Image (spheres, coloured by chain):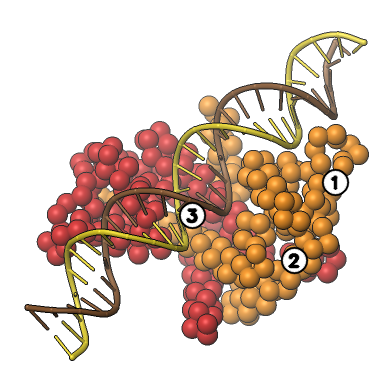
Chain colours: A red, B orange, C brown, D yellow
Amino acid sequence: MIITSDAFAHPASRLALEVFRLNGALIAAGDALVAPLGLTSARWQVMGAVAEACGELSVAGIARNMGLVRQSVQRIADELAAEGILRFAPNPHHRRAKLVQFTERGEALFAEACRRWLTLADALAAALGTDDAARTAEVLRAAREHLNQAQTRKEEAA
Amino acid sequence: MIITSDAFAHPASRLALEVFRLNGALIAAGDALVAPLGLTSARWQVMGAVAEACGELSVAGIARNMGLVRQSVQRIADELAAEGILRFAPNPHHRRAKLVQFTERGEALFAEACRRWLTLADALAAALGTDDAARTAEVLRAAREHLNQAQTRKEEAA
DNA sequence: GTCATTATGACAACATACAGTCATAATGAT
DNA sequence: ATCATTATGACTGTATGTTGTCATAATGAC
């Protein structure tokens, strides 16, 4: 394996591997956090998008905001609606694309999930230092934009 | 949604969201990179673990190194073996736990995947700055350790 | 107004991951 | 040496996400 061992030591490789590991750790921590509420990380994430949009977005719109495809969000939203956490409200601008909104129960559930997360988030920010957390987030954003641009350039070339 | 809007602005929330986004971007970029070789990010990742272990680990050992469960690695390894990319070699220390190794074709494929990745990795490191990339990786590692410790403490309390 | 294009939701197939269970091999305490 | 414990692989089920396809609603060009 000598010929490829360089690849593991590359700064970008180390960064990518840490991103993968932290992504897994965050999802695991999130699942543990909201499991007692009958939620999962994925459901919580969809609920976060609904909250951010103040109930004024359709499933497709939420998916765009989240960087996922419509179908993934649709399945989660259908489940949450079946459990009385979300509901589909008529959209004055579009007959088919219903607006995804919280029920009262859903809103309370999301508030409780946020409360739990903030406890962990405070501890995490304190451990890392708020400045370091902000700087790190900025580097990650820059890395993502570089990847997206590289992807776009490649697609345009094709 | 007023009561929970704080959660989105929290430094730890911003960091977590960027981790999720970059994780997705990295997987997408990796898939695009190795798709012409008939590989996927998941297959490439397993092959990376095989390379790192120099063919001296079983499926369960690789899973531990990767932070995944045995079953996920087993499925990928079985597929790669069926396609002549990996093979299961007898383990002198364990009759059932075969050693996962590259075939010649697999080794060449992995070398080519690494070559492609290094091109992108160099561009990414140049765009971010090598120092920033290293510092960022360190913060992510610290964040993951904090989460893991919090998780462990919680389990011990239970 | 008509018609091509786009957006949306519904449905199915597949890839990847986790959890649970089982049988058997390996290990360790006695 | 025996037996309980642990490790491993095989199998099943489930959660999450992607892609592809289809029908229909909405939009825009003319």
Q: Is residue A131 visible?
A: no
Q: Is residue B43 visible?
A: yes
For the point 53% across and 34% down, the residue is: B154
For the point 91% across and 39% down, the residue is: B92
* A27 lies above or below C5: above
Type of amino acid under label 1: Ala
Residue A129, horizontal then vertical, whole percent = 52, 58
Type of amino acid under label 3: Ala
Marks 2 and 1 sit apart, C-alpha to C-alpha, by: 19 Å
Which chain does the numbered disc 2 sit on? B
Which chain does the numbered disc 1 sit on? B
Q: In which quarter of the view is residue C29 placed?
A: top right
* B88 lies above or below C27: below
> Dot 2, how many residues are within 10 Å of its Cα: few (below 14), some (14-19), or many (20+)?
many
In-image side of A157 versus B92 (left or right): left
**How many numbered discs sit on the rendered protein?**
3
Give the numbered dot on residue B109: 2
Check if mark 2 and mark 1 are on a common chain.
yes
Type of amino acid under label 2: Leu
Give the numbered dot on residue A143: none
Residue B33, horizontal then vertical, whole percent = 62, 70
Seen from the viewer's position, the closer of residues D4 and A32 is D4
Q: Nearer the viewer, mark 3 or mark 2?
A: 2
Give the numbered dot on residue B89: 1
For the point 52% across and 85% down, the residue is: A157
Give the numbered dot on residue A125: 3
